[in-house]
Structure formats: C-alpha cells, structure tokens
C-alpha cells in the first residue's frame, strides 16, 4: 500500500464524517461519499451537518487544505471504508440494504490490491457477504481483493478523541486482509489494534452492546421487584454495590438509542435457539417502558378519582439518555407519546432540544409549577436542582430525587 493511501469513505454521518476528517488530517487524500446532496454541499463549504464537539474546526481545516472532498459518487482509491446505517426491520431482522447499496456503488471503481473495510455495526457474516457481492461482479479481483471488518465503539460527544485513542478489533476475511487493515488504521489510531478474523470482529461489537443491555435489564427487573416488595431500589443497589465484586447498574425508563436497543437483535435473529438471555434482556428492557406507562396511568386515574379533575402530567426528559438531544428509539419519548395518544394532558420537557421538532415543549421550571404529577423519565443534570411544592406527586424512574 502507498505511504499515504487514498481513501473513500462511504457515508458521512456521525461515524463517517469524523473518521474521514481524522484520516484527512493525517495528510491522506479522502473522498467522502453520501447519498444526500445537502450533506455533500455542506461539507464542501467546510461546514458540518451533525453535532459533535470540535468536528466543525477539523472539517473546515481539512476541506480548505483540499484533503477532504465530498461527493455523491465514489472515485478510485486504495482504501474504501463503509459507515452507513444498519437499522433493523419491523421483525427485528437486520436491514443490510444500506451496506449492500454502498458496496454495489464502489464495485466499478475497485482495482487490484484494494482494501475494503466495513465499519457499520453488522450481523456475523456480513463482511463475507460483502466480499461475495464484489467478487460476483468482479471475478477479476479474486486473488487481489482485501476485505476486513472493524467495528466502531466511539461515544457521541467525545468522538474525535475516541476514534484516535480507543483500541480496535480488526478482522479480515484472510490474514493478509487483517494485516493490511491494521497497517491502514496505524496511520491515525494510537489505541492498540487487535488482529482477529472478520466473524469475531463482527460479534465483538454486537456482544459489547448485548452485554450492556443485559446488565441494564437486571437493574430494570430489580426495580420492578422492589416496587412490588415496597423496597427502595436505589438504596438496595447502593448497599449491594458495597460488595467488592458486585456492580449493579442503574435502572431507568427502558433502553433506547440506535446501538444498545438495536444490536442485540442482530444476534437473536441469527441465533434464536442459543440467545435466550440476550432476547430476554431486550424484552425486559422493553417491558420496563410499558410498566412505567401503566404506573403513570394508574396514578393519573387515582388523582382524577380523588380530585375530580384530570391531572396535568409533566414528562421530564424525552432523549434516550441523559444530557443529549438524541431521540432515536427513546423510551422516554415513547412514554410521553403514548400518554398523549391516550388523551392525558402532558407537558413535554426536553431542555437539550434547541427546537421542539414540531413538539410544543415546556421549560422544566414552568412544568413543575403547572403539573400535578411530575414524572422523571431521563436523568438530565439540570433536573437535579429543581424544587417543587409538597402537593406534587413525584414519579421518579431514574433516581433523580
Ligand atoms: N453513531 C454512533 O455513535 C455509532 C457508534 C458505533 C457504531 N455505529 C454504527 O456505525 C454505522 C453508521 O452510523 P452513523 O451513526 O454514522 O449513521 P448516520 O445515519 O449518522 O450516517 C450514515 C450516513 O450514510 C449515508 N448513506 C446511506 N446510504 C448510503 C450509501 N449507499 N452510500 C453513501 N452514503 C450512504 C446517509 O445519508 C448518512 O449520512 C451504523 O452501523 C451504526 O450502528 C454508530
């Protein structure tokens, strides 16, 4: 591979754009490809379309130095990276259509010796499918194509640091593919690069999120047991965690986001017989959200019976986790929308959203004054300093009060 390989990044979202900018900042020529013209135009102006600290300055710098160019069509390059979405379909089966569409798009540009790396979170066997798709259309590359999988494990909000410093598991479809992919990441990663095969690397990513989902499910199940037993779950967990080898996580309203709530299904859909606990954890975390809705509805009905009027319910937090504005797969949003759909009077509070995206938002202070029932759905920092009068009914699903 050339000293400074040329690179094409397929997909310029939360993963693709910071990765493309970081690679370009190491002096490599990067072409970013996205299907959305507005994304391409924004980046070519040296601006960004996503929220991520310090990314705007880096993109501005590499675009103006001519090292990063965005376009809608791939160009010839030494290395192709794919970071497009991998959602699931209605039946919890993975939707690989974006990965396959991006792969098809690069096929005409591939030359002998090209390295193709998949970064999208993918079910086991996807890297092999990608290789087969390429070789079906380009049999001339049979002995001269290198394909690898390298999962991304960055934390939104700290992406630029983590892209560079996190360890990575890198698995090729053959030893030479692994070696070439590791040599490529060495250009811009200082974390340790761990060689493996493609299937293991694919599973590593899925297992990281499934493991987290399982731990949260345990905490959520405990919260429902404690409710039935009339035990304060927060005190219980704090005391149990005094044991030197116990570390129970915090329960919540459920599990959301585009990773932990999605990736375990990639294992379950492929290995339904074997993945009993992984499936159960998904079900428990989803059930916790339904359980919270029932609790709130019951409190509202009790309020109405005692006060002869319908209560105003303040839903505190809509995002899928604390202190962000991301609503994807958010259980708090689901609780709020379900209550609204069922005719309850709801004040929606999400201090991290700059505009409501069509929702009528209330400020936290207004909501706690106006509401009869205050429901904490997300553990946003700003909620801790709120004070409210004694006549309010507080329902705290996240341990804020
Ligand atoms: N965002 C995260 O924090 C995170 C963390 C770890 C892993 N991942 C995984 O990384 C992958 C990408 O996630 P993301 O958050 O960057 O998604 P995203 O939706 O922010 O960005 C994906 C981009 O790909 C573009 N795209 C779709 N089809 C395309 C095609 N055929 N050709 C070129 N571009 C195409 C979309 O327009 C979009 O801009 C997913 O598999 C995700 O699960 C994401």
Image (cartoon, rainbow, N blue to C red):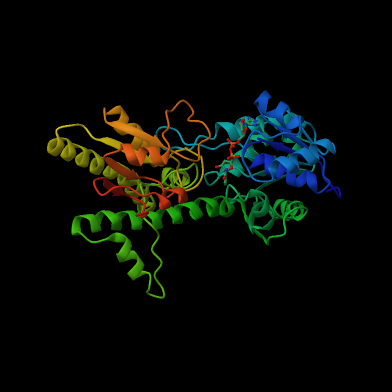
Residue at image coords 37%, 36%: 334
61 lies above or below 73: below
Front-most of residues 207 and 360: 360
> Which quarter of the image is occupied by the C terminus?
bottom left
Front-most of residues 261 and 193: 261
Say whether residue 283 is left or right of residue 135: left
Residue at image coords 36%, 55%: 399
Whole-percent x and y of residue 224? 26, 53
342 lies above or below 237: above
Whole-percent x and y of residue 10? 68, 35
Residue 72 in sight: no
Residue at image coords 30%, 33%: 339
Front-most of residues 153 and 339: 339
Whole-percent x and y of residue 134? 67, 35
Whole-percent x and y of residue 88? 47, 36
> Which quadrant of the figure shows ligand 1?
top right
Q: Give the quadrant of residue 106.
A: top right
Residue 187 in sight: yes
């Amino acid at each position: 591979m050339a000293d400074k390989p040329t690179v094409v990044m397929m997909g310029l979202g939360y993963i693709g754009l910071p990765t493309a900018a970081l690679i370009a900042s190491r002096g490599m020529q990067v072409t970013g490809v996205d299907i959305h013209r507005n994304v391409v135009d924004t980046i070519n102006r040296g601006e960004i379309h996503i929220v991520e600290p310090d990314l705007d300055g880096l993109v501005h710098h590499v675009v103006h130095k001519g090292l990063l160019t965005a376009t809608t069509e791939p160009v010839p390059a030494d290395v192709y990276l794919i970071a497009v979405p991998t959602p699931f379909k209605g039946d919890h089966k993975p939707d690989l259509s974006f990965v396959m569409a991006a792969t098809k798009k690069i096929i005409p540009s591939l030359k002998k010796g090209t390295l193709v790396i998949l970064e999208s979170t993918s079910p086991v066997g996807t890297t092999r499918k990608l290789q087969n798709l390429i070789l079906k259309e380009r049999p001339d590359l049979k002995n001269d194509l290198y394909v690898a999988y390298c999962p991304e494990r960055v934390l939104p909000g700290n992406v630029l640091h983590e892209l560079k410093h996190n360890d990575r598991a890198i698995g090729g479809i053959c030893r030479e593919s692994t070696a070439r992919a590791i040599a490529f990441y060495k250009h811009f990663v200082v974390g340790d690069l761990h060689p493996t095969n493609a299937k293991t690397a694919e599973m590593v990513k899925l297992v990281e999120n499934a493991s987290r989902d399982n731990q949260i499910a345990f905490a959520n199940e405990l919260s429902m047991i404690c409710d039935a037993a009339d035990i304060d779950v927060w005190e219980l967990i704090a005391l149990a965690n005094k044991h030197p080898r116990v570390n129970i996580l915090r329960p919540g309203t459920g599990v959301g986001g585009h990773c932990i709530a999605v990736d375990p299904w990639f294992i379950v859909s492929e290995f339904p017989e074997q993945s009993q606990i992984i499936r159960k954890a998904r079900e428990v975390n989803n059930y916790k959200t339904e359980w919270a809705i029932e609790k709130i509805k019951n409190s509202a009905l009790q309020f109405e019976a005692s006060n002869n009027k319908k209560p105003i319910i303040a839903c505190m937090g809509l995002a899928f986790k604390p202190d962000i504005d991301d609503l994807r797969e958010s259980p708090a949003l689901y609780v709020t929308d379900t209550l609204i759909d069922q005719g309850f009077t709801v004040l929606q509070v999400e201090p991290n959203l700059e505009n409501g995206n069509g929702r009528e938002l209330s400020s936290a202070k207004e909501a706690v004054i106006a509401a009869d029932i205050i429901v904490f759905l997300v553990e946003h920092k700003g909620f801790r300093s709120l004070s409210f009068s004694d006549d309010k009914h507080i329902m705290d699903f996240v341990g804020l009060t």
